[in-house]
Structures are given as structure tokens and as C-alpha cells.
Image (cartoon, rainbow, N blue to C red):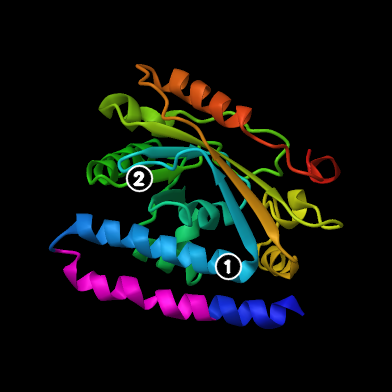
């Protein structure tokens, strides 16, 4: 029954916000900075509406990231983007495959999402250049250095390649820990977290049927400057892991 009113609400939220980036496209040649900033605020509005329509209750602890911050978070689901995006204006760095998703990919581009093919060395270099540009605009950018979402057994190792820009430019790195819960008998490790070979469509419909989702975000203080990106990755992973709540149900589904 929840699908009968949630899907129309999601469609309404989509229709209300989707035209906004199109209004700014004619001005892109004049100011990419203004276009990127507008995209982060559009994404925040979109995220708030989608979280409300899906019954996602977001609770945040700690000081929210300031302008020009690189936010480093663990990765559990596509829902992470909506949850974090509802809390502060930010652009996201996403896997390149998302750019090819029907509708979602084009919309992600319109709100300023950056994309990366992690297996290509040159692509990582370009991603760092784009990160530096967005951070230079005074925008925050959020990355998921685990690279792939997990069922929430623990916070995995952080890849350090995308932290080079923070080392070179002394960018403040803000650790953010994400956790989820939902009413039993549903288990957030499989009904909220999206990982492995799960198909997006069936999983999303299952998520939309849940009575509610409790999302907790714990922000840490900006991490002090590191001269080495691998050391910075270890420090940030420790900060995020120290605030992480293991996801319920993970023993039944995790490997």
C-alpha cells in the first residue's frame, strides 16, 4: 500500500526539481562556478524531498561540513547520496557507471556530479583535477573512498588516490559515518544497504515499502593536514570506523 502514495510523491518531487538545472544551462558558459554552486543547492532540495517521500528520517550528529571541505564517508547504498545531500550543499564523486543510468545519469550530470573510472590511472588524475576545481570554487565535495557499497559489517579500507588533492592543497577533510536501521522484521543490511549483485529496481521497490528508515550521520572534526595521502586515508578510515554502528542483519547477508 505504501507504494500507492510514495511513488506518486517521488514523481512529484522529481517533476518539481528536475527543471531547475535546465534553467541555468544557458549561463554555464558565463560561470561554471555559479552553475556548480546552483547544482549543489538543487541536489539538497531534491534530497530533502526524496527522503521525505521515502520515509527516511535523518539524524545528524556533529558539526556539518563547511564550504570548501572534502567530506569522506563510508558507503552502504545509493541512499547515502540522498541522506548526505539533504544535510549540506555538496557535489558528489560517483562511479562512472552511474552516468549511463537512464534518467538518473543525466540528472546527476545536471546537478554537478563528478564521475570517475577508478580502474584507469588517467581518469583518477582527471578526477583529482575536477575535485581541485570544485574545492577551489569554495564548494564541498563528498567522496566514498571504499569505492563500493557494503552490507555494513565494518568500514573497509579507504583508497587514497582521491585524497591527493587534499594533501597538495591543504583541504580540510571531514569524516562522516553513515548507519541505517528500519523496523523489524526487515533487515537494513539487505533492505536498505545496496551492494554486491543486487538489482536496483527490485531493491528500490523493497526500500519504498518499508514503514520508515532511520539514517544516522556522525560528522567528525576536520582532520589535520597530512603530508602523505596513504596516512591520511588510514586516519580518515579510523575516524569513520570509530563512529560507525554495525548494520543489523549483516550476519545473515554479509560475507
Q: Residue at x 79, y 42 (%)?
A: 250
**C-alpha separation, residue under disc 2 versus residue under disc 1:** 23 Å
- Label 2: element kind: loop
* Span shown in magenta: 12-29
Left or right: 32 in relation to 105: left
The quarter of the picture where the N terminus appears is bottom right
- Label 1: element kind: helix
Give the image location of residue 215, x and y in percent: 63, 51
Q: Residue at x 63, y 78 (%)?
A: 7
- Is residue 77 part of the magenta span, yes or no? no
Give the image location of residue 170, x and y in percent: 29, 26
Task: Identify which residue, 157 or 90, lies in the foreground.
Answer: 90
Left or right: 171 in relation to 47: left
Query: Which residue bears the numbered disc 2?
Result: 140
Q: Residue at x 75, y 57 (%)?
A: 191
Left or right: 253 in relation to 81: right
Mark 1 neighbour density, 10 Å: few (under 14) some (14–19) many (20 or more): some
Tell me which numbered mark, 2 or 1, is placed earlier along the sequence.
1
Magenta region, mostly helix, strand or loop?
helix
Q: Residue at x 38, y 17 (%)?
A: 228
Mark 2 neighbour density, 10 Å: few (under 14) some (14–19) many (20 or more): many
Q: Is residue 167 above or below residue 76?
A: above
Query: Which residue bears the numbered disc 1?
Result: 52
**Residue 78 appearing in the image:** no
Give the image location of residue 182, x and y in percent: 75, 55
Amino acid at each position: 500500500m505504501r507504494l500507492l502514495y510514495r511513488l506518486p510523491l517521488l514523481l512529484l518531487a522529481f517533476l518539481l526539481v528536475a527543471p531547475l538545472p535546465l534553467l541555468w544551462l544557458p549561463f554555464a558558459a558565463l560561470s561554471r562556478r555559479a552553475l556548480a554552486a546552483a547544482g549543489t543547492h538543487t541536489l539538497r532540495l531534491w534530497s530533502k524531498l526524496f527522503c521525505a517521500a521515502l520515509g527516511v528520517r535523518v539524524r545528524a550528529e556533529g558539526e556539518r561540513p563547511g564550504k570548501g571541505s572534502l567530506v569522506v564517508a563510508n558507503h552502504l547504498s545509493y541512499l547515502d547520496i540522498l541522506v548526505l545531500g539533504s544535510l549540506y550543499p555538496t557535489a558528489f564523486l560517483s562511479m562512472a557507471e552511474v552516468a549511463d543510468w537512464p534518467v538518473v545519469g543525466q540528472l546527476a550530470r545536471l546537478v554537478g556530479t563528478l564521475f570517475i573510472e577508478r580502474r584507469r590511472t588517467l581518469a583518477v588524475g582527471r578526477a583529482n583535477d575536477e575535485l581541485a576545481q570544485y574545492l577551489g570554487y569554495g564548494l564541498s565535495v563528498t567522496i566514498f573512498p571504499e569505492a563500493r557499497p557494503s552490507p555494513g559489517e565494518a568500514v573497509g579500507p579507504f583508497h587514497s588516490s582521491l585524497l591527493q588533492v587534499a594533501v597538495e592543497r591543504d583541504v580540510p577533510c571531514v569524516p562522516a559515518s553513515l548507519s541505517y536501521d528500519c523496523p523489524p522484521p526487515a533487515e537494513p543490511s539487505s533492505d536498505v544497504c545496496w551492494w554486491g549483485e543486487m538489482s536496483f529496481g527490485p531493491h528500490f521497490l523493497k526500500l519504498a515499502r518499508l514503514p520508515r528508515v532511520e539514517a544516522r550521520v556522525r560528522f567528525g572534526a576536520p582532520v589535520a593536514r597530512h603530508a602523505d595521502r596513504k596516512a591520511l586515508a588510514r586516519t580518515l578510515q579510523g575516524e569513520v570506523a570509530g563512529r560507525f554502528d554495525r548494520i543489523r542483519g549483516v550476519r545473515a547477508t554479509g560475507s
